[in-house]
Image: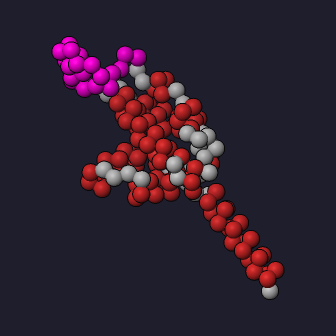
């Protein structure tokens, strides 16, 4: 009887571990949205960003399969749609920053942390290769105007 209970316990542990190993970025994102971040409008903006740019590319990828080369595809896809008037630099930077927040939360969450092969795969990705040279993440020259008035960051 005891041996049977121990075998059942081991089988349940294996099933739970297998379930955990098959969790996807989409699963991670859902949990992060629910428990890891709280923004205006029930996180509507970040949900829209991820639904448009991130989840179609990596939503069904297992967490353990996330590598810099897989994440690179997100930014490549964004830049493919760039034009002279819409360089998509700001979108690349915004998505990168939002993904950094997801991975920071993940690293502080034992359940998810153990699934990452790379502790933070974004740290192994050269974001500058997706940003046009000379791009400033400031709109309307506000930073330049403040700097000329003696303001320093």
Query: Which residue occupies 31% across, 50% down?
Result: 39
The percent position of residue 123, horizontal first and vertical second, equals: 54, 33
In this rendering, does residue 58 appear at all? Answer: no
In this rendering, does residue 114 appear at all? Answer: yes
Q: Is residue 28 left or right of residue 52?
A: right
Question: Magenta part of the protein: which range?
Answer: 133-153
Q: Quadrant of the N terminus?
A: bottom right
Q: Is residue 92 left or right of residue 66?
A: left
Query: Which residue occupies 56% across, 38% down?
Result: 121
Query: Which residue occupies 23% across, 16% down?
Result: 147
Q: How is the image coloured?
A: secondary structure
Above or below, 100 against 140 in this view is below
Q: Is residue 7 left or right of residue 85?
A: right
- The question of residue 89 being in magenta is answered with no
Residue lying furthest bottom: 1
**Quarter occupied by residue 117:** top right
Dominant secondary structure of the magenta stretch? loop
Above or below, 10 against 81 in this view is below
Q: Nearer the viewer, residue 141 or 132?
A: 141
The percent position of residue 104, horizontal first and vertical second, equals: 48, 43
The percent position of residue 60, horizontal first and vertical second, equals: 54, 52
Q: Nearer the viewer, residue 16 or 95?
A: 16
Query: Which residue occupies 52% across, 26% down?
Result: 126
Q: Quadrant of the C terminus?
A: top left
The percent position of residue 138, horizontal first and vertical second, equals: 28, 25
């Amino acid at each position: 009887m005891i041996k049977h209970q121990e075998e059942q316990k081991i089988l349940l542990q294996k099933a739970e571990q297998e379930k955990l190993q098959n969790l996807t970025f989409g699963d991670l994102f859902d949990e992060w949205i629910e428990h890891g971040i709280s923004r205006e409008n029930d996180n509507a903006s970040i949900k829209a960003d991820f639904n448009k740019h991130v989840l179609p590319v990596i939503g069904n990828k297992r967490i353990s399969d996330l590598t810099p080369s897989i994440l690179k595809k997100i930014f490549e896809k964004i830049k493919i749609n760039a034009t002279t008037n819409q360089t998509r630099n700001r979108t690349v930077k915004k998505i990168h920053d939002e993904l950094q927040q997801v991975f920071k939360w993940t690293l502080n969450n034992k359940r998810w942390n153990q699934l990452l092969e790379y502790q933070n795969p974004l740290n192994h990705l050269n974001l500058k290769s997706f940003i046009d040279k000379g791009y400033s993440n400031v709109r309307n020259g506000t930073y330049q105007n403040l700097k000329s008035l003696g303001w320093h960051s």
